[in-house]
Amino acid sequence: MKLDAIDQTLLNELRENARCPVALLARKVGLSRTAVQARIARLERDRVITGYGARTGAAHEQSQVAAHVMLTVGPKLSGPVEAALRRIPEVRSLLSISGTFDMIAIVQAGSIEGLDALINRIGLIEGVERTHTSVVLSKRFER
C-alpha cells in the first residue's frame, strides 16, 4: 500500500502518542475528524497499523538494564530459536541480520544480575551457538 503525506503524518503522530485525540490529529493534518477516522480505519484494515502499545516513562526506563545480544544460530535452527526467544518476556525485539551474527535480540532486565541470568538463559537455547552482548549505556532518542 502506498502512503501519502497525510497517512505518514498520521502514523508519525500516532507513534508519538497513540492516544492522541482524533480531533487534534484532524487539526494537524487539515482534515475533518470523520476523514481522519476513516484513514486510520483503512490503515488498520490494510495492516499498516497492527496495534497500539504502552511506552514506559523515563523513570522506569532508567531502572532497566538494556542490551543487544548478537546470536550465531546453527544451520536450519532459526525457527526454533525464534520460538524460544518469543517465550522470554525480557526479549523486546528480535532482528534477523547479515554479517558475522544471524540475529540481534534487544533485551531488558531489572538489574545487572537479571541481565546476566537472561544472557545465560539465551545461551542455553538449543541452536544458539554463540552470543556477544553489548550493554546499552544510554538512549539518545527513539522514534
Image (spheres, helix red, strand yellow):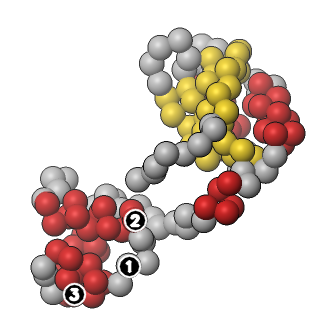
The residue that label 3 is drawn on is 33
Residue positioned 35% across, 84% down in the render = 21
Image position of 2 with respect to 114: above or below: below
Residue positioned 56% across, 26% down in the render = 103
Q: Is mark 3 in CB contact (under 8 Å) with mark 1? A: no
Amino acid type of disc 3?
Arg
**Of pointers 3 and 1, the one earlier in the residue sequence:** 1
Dot 3 surroundings within 10 Å: few (below 14), some, or many (20 or more)? some
Q: From mark 3 to mark 1, how far is it between C-alphas?
A: 12 Å
For residue 42, the mark is: none
- Name the quadrant containing residue 15: bottom left
The residue that label 1 is drawn on is 20
Residue positioned 28% across, 73% down in the render = 40
Q: Taking 54 as reference, is 34 left or right?
A: left
- Residue 79 is situated, as x and y percent measured from the top left of the image, at 59, 30
Amino acid type of disc 2?
Glu
Q: From mark 2 to mark 3, how far is it between C-alphas?
A: 19 Å
Q: Can residue 34 be seen in this view?
A: yes
Q: Is mark 2 in CB contact (under 8 Å) with mark 1? A: yes
